Image (tube, helix red, strand yellow):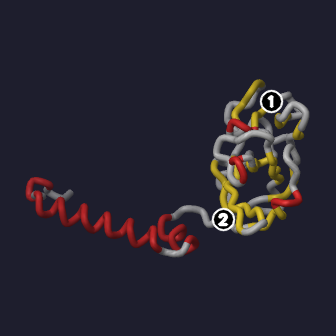
Amino acid sequence: MADLSDFNRRDFIKVGGASIAGLIVVKALPRSVAAAATGAPIYPIMDIGPLSALASGGAIQFNYPDDESPAILIRLTEPGLNGTGPKQSLVAFSQLCTHKGCPLDYNAERKLLICPCHWSTFDPAKAGAIVIGQASQPLPQIALKIEDDLIRAISVDGLIYGRHTNIF
């Protein structure tokens, strides 16, 4: 075991400065290289569809980050927590209930994602928060990016039901 009694202010500054320099280098690297260097998952960037084709209150189903992961993009009629795009109205979530993994249905009239198995209900305007039901976690939210008129999925915040990791 190292003797820390010889660790002085100069050593502290050297170690701290090297750590900060390392973080700056990682932040400056391209996304895939930076993720690999930090051990973070590397998510695919996936085209979902044109923003102009999605009406207010509308939804698009897609799979992300892989073909085994049903997801839903919703264009809310009001700003959403962690939303993106015009008026922060675009949100996307895993469509697997965090209680038992049943596929959720979007009820556009109620503006809620509802599990038909045990009735857990989630609010897409509040970052997929639980409204009622047996689920104990909010829905994993999919980060979106808009380039020109194209909506793209870029990552997932939260663990998709039934997985140890979102990326296989």
Is 31 or 79 nearer to us in this picture?
79
Q: Quadrant of residue 31?
A: bottom right
The label shown at residue 156 is none
Per the image, label 1 sits on a secondary structure element best described as: loop
Residue found at x 67% / y 55%:
143
Q: Position of residue 59 (x, y in %)?
A: 87, 49
Q: Is residue 45 above or below residue 123?
A: below
User: How far across and down, in percent of the image, does residue 1 sit?
Assistant: 20, 57
Vertical relation: 65 (above or below) 79: below
Quadrant of the rendering where the C terminus is positioned: bottom right
How many numbered marks, from 0 up? 2
Alpha carbon separation for disc pair 1 and 2:
28 Å
Q: Residues within 10 Å of mark 2 (few under 14, many from 20)?
A: some
- 73 or 105, nearer to the observer: 73
At x 36%, y 69%, the residue is 22
Instruction: Please tell me whether residue 166 is drawn above or below residue 87 in the rendered image.
Output: below
Q: Which is nearer the eye, 88 or 17?
A: 88
Q: Quadrant of residue 104?
A: top right
Which mark, by number, is residue 120?
1
| Amino acid on which the number 2 mark rests in the picture | Tyr
The residue sitting at 85% across, 60% down in the picture is 52
Q: Of the residues under marks 1 and 2, which one precedes in the sequence?
A: 2
**Tag 1: amino acid:** Ser
Residue 12: where, in percent of width, then height?
Answer: 18, 59
Give whichever of 77, 23 is nearer the camera. Answer: 77
Q: Which residue is mark 2?
A: 43
- Residue at 81% x, 60% y: name it: 51
Label 1 crowd bin: few (<14), some (14–19), many (20+), radius 10 Å: many
Q: Are marks 1 and 2 in contact (CB under 8 Å)?
A: no
> Element at badge 2?
loop
